[in-house]
Image (cartoon, grey):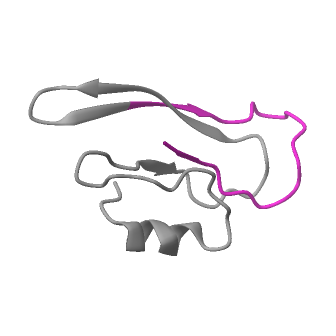
């Protein structure tokens, strides 16, 4: 979870963000990263956010290519930021 504009800027690098008006005293940014994968076909998605009173639960869905599936032969780094 990101709690400051400075950290958000560091992660974004050269990526243009449409709306950067995040009030970190009331909001947060969450990123889920699968790390480096040797092929395409991998996906990650935050599917639900649940307020559990004393903590927040993030439900995620991870898709991996089936064995033998034809996928892009390039290194990928799947992520989802909300």
Question: Would you say 64 lies left or right of 55 here?
Answer: right
**Measuring 33% from the left and 48% from the top, which residue is drawn there?**
28
Q: Looking at this view, is 23 or 50 the one in front? A: 23
Q: Looking at this view, is 31 or 43 the one in front? A: 31
**Corner quadrant of residue 76:** bottom right
Vertical placement of residue 17 versus 4, above or below: above
* In magenta segment, residue 5: no
Vertical placement of residue 55 versus 76, above or below: above
Q: x and y percent of residue 26 in the render?
A: 25, 46
**Measuring 34% from the left and 54% from the top, which residue is drawn there?**
1
* Region in magenta: 59-82
* In magenta segment, residue 68: yes
| Total count of labels | 0
**Measuring 69% from the left and 42% from the top, which residue is drawn there?**
42
Q: Looking at this view, is 34 or 5 the one in front? A: 5
**Measuring 45% from the left and 54% from the top, which residue is drawn there?**
21
Q: x and y percent of residue 66 in the render?
A: 75, 30
């Amino acid at each position: 979870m990101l709690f400051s504009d400075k950290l958000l800027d560091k992660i974004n690098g050269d990526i243009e963000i449409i709306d950067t008006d995040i009030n970190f005293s009331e909001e947060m940014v969450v990123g889920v990263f699968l790390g480096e994968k040797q092929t395409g076909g991998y996906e990650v998605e935050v599917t639900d956010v649940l307020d559990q009173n004393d903590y927040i639960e993030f439900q995620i869905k991870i898709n991996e290519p089936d064995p033998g599936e034809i996928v892009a032969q390039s290194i990928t780094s799947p992520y989802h930021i909300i």
